[in-house]
């Protein structure tokens, strides 16, 4: 299960945008976003929250796992808690530290969510995006091991899921109806976990993992067999795929903080290009579309966006949003807008610092965003 971290304060001055309008909304409670997808052009955010200042050791304590949908103008259409399956409720004997691990959208508009109601025991849920209601749920992962899910990605009518089982990389593919296509565990040496996964156009899948001080990229063929592997120095990789080019954003630890890198790989995992970002960063998210990559990253009191061609050539770098700090960054992008979820701490009445997630809509063509309140 992902560790829940406190985030840093985000502050900014108001700003006006040309159409489409820009806005920012806060999510319920002390919240941590797990992902954003677009369903019918509307952003849907999956998040986990708890009451600010709650006693985690109280037997009545419960995290709230929810999905919230907004329209393009920022109006909240719903905020629905994901109910715990009856099989989970029967097993709970104390505090519940459940968390959503990720969300993906299917072509018909439905949503697939992975949640851990009990740590190390993930469930796959299909939701109606119009209402947020659960269509079905089922346990997944290794029933004999502690399974941690880090990411989920759409793959046509299927989804690809990545994480770890004990010290092994875990990757699986499921249909939108919950049928397991395949699953694999890979021993990458030491403690390893898949940070991100993506599907390729030929039905194969790629996973980006951290193993010690190395990034491990693994491509799986249609049947789930490992087809190629590449390693290089780094950690915490995020990836996206466009036109069969794999874009990987990762960090290089150093004495000044983590320095961001971007690599473009072809389908055989041969390196096409590498780009270094000198400033330390606190969060990053890479998205692909229309044959290009956009890398959103938080640095120097801003959230910036770097654009790359389908072959990894750096084309532009601009300010997307002014922010003191950016953590737990999640992005969904369309042709006319980008939706960014980020977290800032606020103080409760008793002085406790609690995180709050906020969702902003920005114009992807704007290079002068000032920060939205």
Image (cartoon, rainbow, N blue to C red):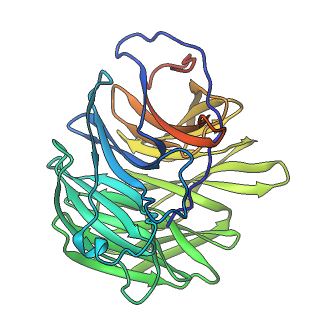
Rendered location of residue 308, percent (x, y): 52, 39
Q: Nearer the viewer, residue 35 or 56?
A: 56
Which residue is the extreme one toward the bottom?
144
Q: Quadrant of residue 290?
A: top left
Q: Residue at x 42, y 63 (%)?
A: 98
Q: Is residue 349 visible?
A: yes
Q: Is residue 325 above or below residue 373?
A: below
Q: Is residue 362 visible?
A: no
Left or right of residue 268, residue 112 in this image:
left
Rendered location of residue 17, percent (x, y): 44, 12
Q: Nearer the viewer, residue 174 or 355?
A: 355
Left or right of residue 50, residue 172 in this image:
left
Which residue is the extreme one toward the right?
255
Q: Quadrant of residue 364?
A: top left
Q: Quadrant of residue 270?
A: bottom right
Rendered location of residue 325, percent (x, y): 66, 35
Count of marks, rendered view: 0
Q: Residue at x 51, y 62 (%)?
A: 58
Q: Residue at x 45, y 41 (%)?
A: 29
Q: Residue at x 40, y 90 (%)?
A: 144
Left or right of residue 223, residue 235 in this image:
right
Q: Is residue 174 above or below residue 262?
A: below
Rendered location of residue 251, percent (x, y): 67, 54
Q: Nearer the viewer, residue 218 or 51?
A: 51
């Amino acid at each position: 299960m992902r560790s829940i971290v406190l985030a840093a304060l985000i502050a900014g001055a108001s700003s006006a945008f040309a159409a489409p309008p820009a806005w920012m909304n806060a999510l319920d409670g002390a919240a941590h976003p797990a992902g954003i997808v677009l369903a019918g052009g509307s952003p849907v955010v999956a998040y986990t929250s708890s009451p600010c200042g709650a006693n985690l050791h109280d037997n009545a304590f419960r995290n709230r796992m929810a999905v919230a949908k907004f329209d393009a103008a920022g109006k909240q259409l719903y905020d629905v808690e994901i109910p715990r399956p009856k099989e989970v409720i029967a097993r709970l004997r104390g505090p519940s530290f459940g968390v959503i691990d990720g969300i993906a959208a299917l072509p018909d508009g439905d949503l697939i969510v992975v949640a851990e109601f009990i740590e190390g025991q993930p469930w796959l849920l299909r939701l109606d995006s119009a209402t947020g209601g659960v269509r079905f749920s089922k346990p997944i992962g290794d029933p004999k091991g502690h399974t941690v899910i880090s990411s989920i990605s759409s793959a046509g009518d299927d989804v690809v899921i990545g994480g770890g089982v004990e010290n092994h990389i875990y990757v699986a593919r499921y249909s939108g109806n919950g049928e397991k296509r395949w699953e694999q565990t890979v021993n990458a040496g030491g403690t390893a976990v898949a940070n991100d996964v993506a599907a390729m156009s030929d039905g194969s899948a790629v996973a980006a993992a951290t193993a010690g001080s190395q990034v491990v990229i693994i491509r799986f063929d249609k049947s789930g067999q490992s087809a190629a592997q590449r390693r290089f120095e780094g950690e915490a990789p995020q990836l996206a795929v466009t036109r069969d080019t794999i874009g990987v954003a990762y960090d290089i630890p150093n004495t000044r903080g983590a320095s961001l890198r971007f690599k473009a790989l072809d389908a055989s995992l041969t390196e096409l290009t590498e780009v270094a970002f000198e400033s330390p960063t606190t969060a990053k998210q890479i998205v692909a579309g229309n044959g290009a990559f956009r890398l959103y990253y938080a640095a120097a009191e801003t959230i910036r966006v770097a654009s790359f061609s389908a072959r990894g050539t750096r084309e532009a770098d601009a300010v997307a949003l002014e922010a003191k700090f950016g953590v737990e960054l999640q992005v969904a992008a369309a042709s006319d807008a980008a939706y960014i979820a980020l977290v800032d701490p606020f103080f409760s009445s008793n002085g406790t610092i609690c995180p709050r997630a906020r969702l902003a809509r920005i114009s992807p063509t704007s290079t002068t965003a000032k920060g939205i309140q």
